[in-house]
Image: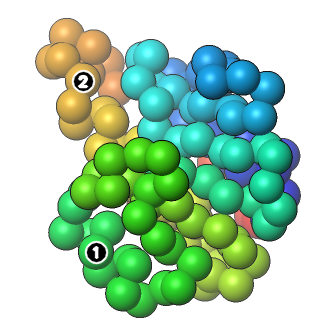
Amino acid sequence: MTLEDLRRFALSLPDTSEDMPFGPDILALRLHGKIFMLINLDVMPLRINLKCNPTRAVELRALYPQVTPGWHMNKKHWNSVTELELLPRGLVRSLICHSYNCVLSSLPMKERKSLYPVEESYTGGKSW
């Protein structure tokens, strides 16, 4: 899974935008201004940070050595994921959708009204 694959998939989610508020090495993907995914562009293999339900975060860390507490983030609510190619097919997409949905559920009702959660099996019309 390449950087461009990750970026393209995240941007396929409704009302998603991107910017680089932390400098040229970190790409932030946002929903209504709130970050749901960070991609460290300066590290190989790629490392992404994703928001996660605290209970699920612990379960994922126990199941997959590639999932660790969020690097430079609140370890309770964020996971870092690396070596993406070693994870089961579709899991990374599912984790991105879960992160998006976590942020969506935290938005004020006024902003959330026109949006809906994405299925965690959402493919964005692409298969990768």
* Disc 1: which residue: 58
Task: Give x and y (percent) for residue 20.
Answer: 68, 22
Mark in the foreground, 2 or 1: 1
Q: Residue furthest bottom?
A: 63
Task: Give x and y (percent) for residue 40.
Answer: 70, 46
In the rendered structure, the answer to whether residue 51 lies left or right of residue 21 reads: left
Please tell me in which quadrant of the rendered image residue 11 appears. top right
Q: Residue at x 29, y 52 (%)?
A: 77
Q: Residue at x 65, y 68 (%)?
A: 82
Q: Residue at x 69, y 33 (%)?
A: 27
Res 107 label:
2
Q: Name which residue type carries label 2.
A: Leu
Task: Give x and y (percent) for residue 116.
Answer: 32, 34
Residue 52 visible from this viewpoint: no
74 up-or-down from 120: above or below? above
Indicate the secondary structure of the residue bearing disc 2.
loop
Quarter the C terminus occupies: bottom right
**Mark 2 vs 1, N-terminal side:** 1
Q: Residue furthest left?
A: 109
24 up-or-down from 36: above or below? above
1 up-or-down from 98: above or below? below
